[in-house]
Amino acid sequence: GTVVALVPAAGRGVRLGETTPKAFVPVGGSAMVRLAVEGLIASGAVDRIIVMVPAEFVESAVALLPPSDSVHVVVGGAERIDSVRAGIAAAPEAAYFLVHDAARALTPPGLIARVAAELRAGHLAVVPALPVADTIKTVDAAGAVTGTPDRAQLRAIQTPQGFAAELLRAAYLSEGVQATDDAGLVELLGTQVHTIQGDPLAFKITTPLDLLLAHAVLDGADF
Ligand code: CTP
Ligand code: MG
């Protein structure tokens, strides 16, 4: 079955605070979106890659991505969910989807390959997960603590998130649904989502501190 990677890269990067949209911010000389696409190619697990970018960045994306018949650029949407929906529409041939944030630019190719392998092994939905270091609390609108979920049962979820294509298409059929990740939409359908061990290097570059960390990693920092 054909594995299609969808790369949401159409965000503005408000929290990073650069003038360029985040996916086009360089890390160690390459735009984040290029690093993310190179990682997908290096995994050897992906047949085609569709990158969703802001409308006015289509040309620059085509220019900076690795030249390949299997890498395509399409226009994303106002919210991440809209960008993923645009990617799904551009890949009617997909048997499996890997949805992978451009902002997780340093994701090891081996993690990508493991997600794809779990799909081929028969899991319908697969996400990388890591234990959380902080205690997580719920709070109300006034900031008062309303609860402390047992940390041992919590996981931080990364990308790539892998799905049987028909399942992801079904999850995105319903308009007006809300979730902070793609697996969240699949969960709403009642389908079980399988976790595998994530990787610290698949962290999402969100803030200036994250960008500093990414530069340090690429400079070969020992940690
Ligand atoms: N994304 C997208 N389309 C959007 C919003 C986000 O394709 N309308 C992508 C981003 O480019 C990023 C990924 O989804 O690769 C994860 O989103 P996030 O880290 O939140 O990036 P931004 O939305 O760009 O950042 P911010 O929320 O700080 O503005
Ligand atoms: Mg965002």
Image: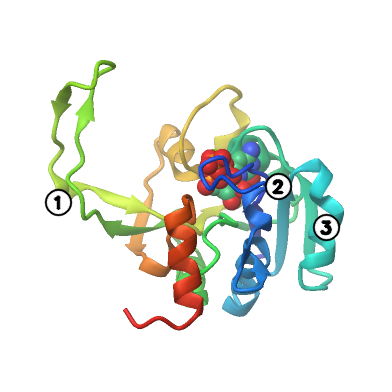
Find the distance from the CA under tag 3 to the CA under tag 2: 18 Å
Q: Is residue 159 left or right of residue 142?
A: right
Residue position marked by numbered label 2 in the rendering: 87
Q: Dividing the image into 4 quarters, which one contains the N terminus?
A: bottom right
- For badge 1, the amino acid type reads Ala
Q: Residues within 10 Å of mark 3 (few under 14, many from 20)?
A: few
Q: Is residue 28 left or right of residue 64?
A: left
Label disc, if present, on residue 9 of the rendered structure: none
First in sequence: mark 1 vs mark 3? 3
- For badge 2, the amino acid type reads Gly
Colour approach in the figure: rainbow
Residue position marked by numbered label 3 in the rendering: 60
Residue at figure coordinates x 20%, y 50% from the top left:
134
Find the distance from the CA under tag 1 to the CA under tag 2: 35 Å
Residue at figure coordinates x 48%, y 54% from the top left:
208
Residue position marked by numbered label 1 in the rendering: 152
Q: Secondary structure at mark 2?
A: helix
Q: Residues within 10 Å of mark 2 (few under 14, many from 20)?
A: many
Task: Please provide percent x and percent y for residue 69.
Answer: 84, 70
